[in-house]
Amino acid sequence: QVQLVESGGGLVQSGGSLRLSCAASGTIFTIDVMGWYRQAPGKQREVVAVITSGGSTNYADPVQGRSTISKDNAKNTVYLQMNNLNPEGTAVYYCCADLVRLNTRQIYWGQGTQVTVSS
């Protein structure tokens, strides 16, 4: 099994910053892509940013230029630095890992971390 544990969420004022972390643990796996998604109340889950094993990144338009996704391969950890947050960023943020384990592709999700941006 693989576990994803997120941290770093919280309450922040509009214009503020937060850094989310997601650590993957378990046995015998190779991560291809890790990403951050978010789900606001009454809305569908949407992608925020993804990063490949090679370091390529992609961002959703609403966070482009204000967020940076990065990773530490040695720690199997992905980070999301979010700057200049606005109330539209209020959501539960989920970490996702697309990985290969036991010769099969598997997708794992974290439990989510709440981000609340006050106006």
Image (cartoon, rainbow, N blue to C red):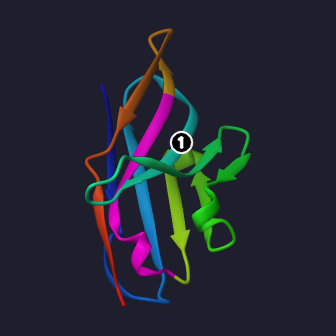
Q: Position of residue 84 (x, y in %)?
A: 55, 84
- In the image, is residue 2 above or below residue 94? above
| Residue that label 1 marks | 34
91 magenta-colored: yes
Q: Position of residue 76 (x, y in %)?
A: 50, 44
Assess disc 1: are there few (<14), some (14-19) or many (≥20) residues with their C-alpha within 10 Å of its C-alpha: many
Seen at 69% across and 71% down, the residue is 65
Q: Position of residue 66 (x, y in %)?
A: 62, 74
Seen at 34% across and 55% down, the residue is 6
84 magenta-colored: no
- Amino acid on which disc 1 is placed: Met
**What are the residue bounds of the magenta stretch?**
85-98
Quarter holding the C terminus? bottom left
Instruction: Out of 49 and 22, give the one closest to the viewer.
Output: 49
- Where on the picture, by quarter, is residue 93? bottom left
Q: Residue furthest top?
A: 103
Seen at 43% across and 65% down, the residue is 20
- In the image, is residue 13 above or below residue 98? below
Quarter holding the N terminus? top left
Q: Is residue 28 visible?
A: yes
Instruction: Out of 70 and 25, give the one closest to the viewer.
Output: 70
Name the side, left or right, on which 61 lies relative to 42. Answer: right
